[in-house]
Amino acid sequence: MIRYVVFLVLLSIWASVEGRSISQFLTEKSTGTKWAVLVAGSNGWWNYRHQADVCHAYQLLKKGGLKDENIIVFMYDDIANNTENPRPGVLINNPHGQDVYQGVPKDYVGEDVNADNFFNVILANKSGITGGSGKILDSGPNDNIFIYYTDHGGPGIVSMPTGLVYANDLINVLKKKHASGTYSKMVFYLEACESGSMFDGLLPEGLNIYVTTASKPDENSWGTYCGLGSGACLVECPPPEFDGVCLGDLYSVAWMEDSDVQDRQTTTLDNQYDRIACRTAANLTYGSHVMQYGDMELSVDALFQYMGSVSTSHSQAPCPMASAPSPMDAASFLTSSENVDQRDTELFYLTSKYQGAPKGSNEEFEANRKLNEVISQRNQVDNSVKRLGELLFGVEKGNEVLQSVRPAGQPLVDNWDCLKSYVKTFEAHCGKLTAYGKKHVRGIANICNAGIESEEMVAATAQACSS
Ligand SMILES: *[C@@H]1O[C@H](CO)[C@@H](O)[C@H](O)[C@H]1NC(C)=O
Ligand SMILES: *[C@@H]1O[C@H](CO)[C@@H](O)[C@H](O)[C@H]1NC(C)=O
Ligand SMILES: *[C@@H]1O[C@H](CO)[C@@H](O)[C@H](O)[C@H]1NC(C)=O
């Protein structure tokens, strides 16, 4: 009798445990949570577009049904209330666009937008977070993750308002996340100059991660919907009061305006890739090659698996590209309001300030001074790097060694510690690398690849940058 009761008790415990885990298993299988991490890594008015991009991304995911508790937003948040904002408290990401700022969670703003917080958010390492809302990517094994990052970059790096995200650190974090078994699949969209270099030859297959980047490893990315007040607009001008800034970035706007109108239940990541690649390369004079990396088998997934879906009417335009610009002179960013090389957006902004100022005014004088200062900084960093190359490799070969680009599939640099240390050395002697100067990180990487010893690098850098 007693044995029989014990058996019944055991049986009922077993049944309830099994019952719970089966139903849990079923719901998790079919309804894993969708998570997103959105990062705008810049600050300053002339970088309006990055925060506008991220706010737009939030809105489309929110409309897709993702919950605020599952969307983690990094943005400096100095744009909406910026004294230069002609529409206080509002951000737009398209010339005819609605406000995208309203409702965006401010998880990490100001100085809390940094590489450590970004990595610890991905790894759900709460103890490593400083400041911010403390929201982390607390995902489970059946959940999907979407990461979108938009910013300035350079070979092997993307920027943060302070500091850098190095490619090898990012890849290591993604490997750790995979090893922790806390997601099913991940999609990573990245916009920055040389964004391909963050993954090319670095991201292994088998992590269940699919990536697209705005550009090849050695190519700039582009701002779009840029206004230069002069009325010289080729495709779509922002409203005239947005002089000198771009409302969005070309690749970013391409994927988001696509996700806004497509049927996310049926269109796949690969379908989307084709359309954004087409639009972003619409005219390669003012565009870039969108790249794919990682586990290509994920690319047959429908968008809704990562971005949720909306039930509105859908457009099926094959390639919603802007019409090709008409011929124009080579100093394109000064005469066109189409797309602006991200590296030139500061110059674009200052040029518009200068041109817009009343003739002979203090404002004009000030704008001219600032413009000349930035131009001379650009020349200076170019010259410093050129001299450094000559000192290390000779007048003949210096430039060639620094500019050489490794074949596709090979990482930028073999020794990342060397790169980090030599970037520090360079900055200590030659000044901080600006959004423009970051293009020279490839040269510094090539110095590491050539096996130049630390003492030699320090001595040559000191000499190259002694005025
Ligand atoms: C912007 O200004 C509004 C209205 O004054 C204020 O409520 C809001 O907190 C400000 N936001 C930031 C980021 O400063
Ligand atoms: C979490 O962050 C702390 C502080 O940065 C660090 O020491 C620790 O190694 C991190 N843990 C993991 C699992 O990454
Ligand atoms: C790209 O732009 C250039 C310069 O504006 C123009 O000459 C060329 O025809 C365009 N190419 C295409 C394919 O539209």
Image (cartoon, helix red, strand yellow):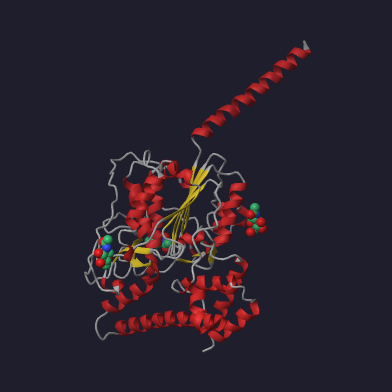
For the image shown, how many numbered marks are present on the structure? 0
4 and 308: which is toward the camera: 308
Q: Which quadrant of the structure image shows residue 131?
A: bottom right
In the image, residue 141 sits, relative to residue 332, either above or below, namely above
Q: Residue furthest bottom?
A: 467
The x and y percentages for residue 423 are 56, 73
The x and y percentages for residue 63 are 37, 44
Asked if residue 50 lies left or right of residue 428, the reply is: left
Q: Which quadrant of the structure image shows residue 55?
A: bottom left
Q: Could one spot residue 20 in this view of the protein?
A: yes
The x and y percentages for residue 328 are 24, 71
Q: Residue at x 64, y 21 (%)?
A: 15
48 and 318: which is toward the camera: 318
21 and 458: which is toward the camera: 458
Q: Residue at x 66, y 19 (%)?
A: 12
Q: Residue at x 37, y 38 (%)?
A: 266
Q: Residue furthest front?
A: 396
Q: Could one spot residue 238 in this view of the protein?
A: no
The x and y percentages for residue 249 are 36, 61
In the image, residue 284 sits, relative to residue 6, either above or below, namely below
The quadrant in which the N terminus is found is top right
Image quadrant of ligand 1? bottom left
In the image, residue 335 sits, relative to residue 73, either above or below, namely below
Q: Residue furthest right?
A: 2
307 and 443: which is toward the camera: 443
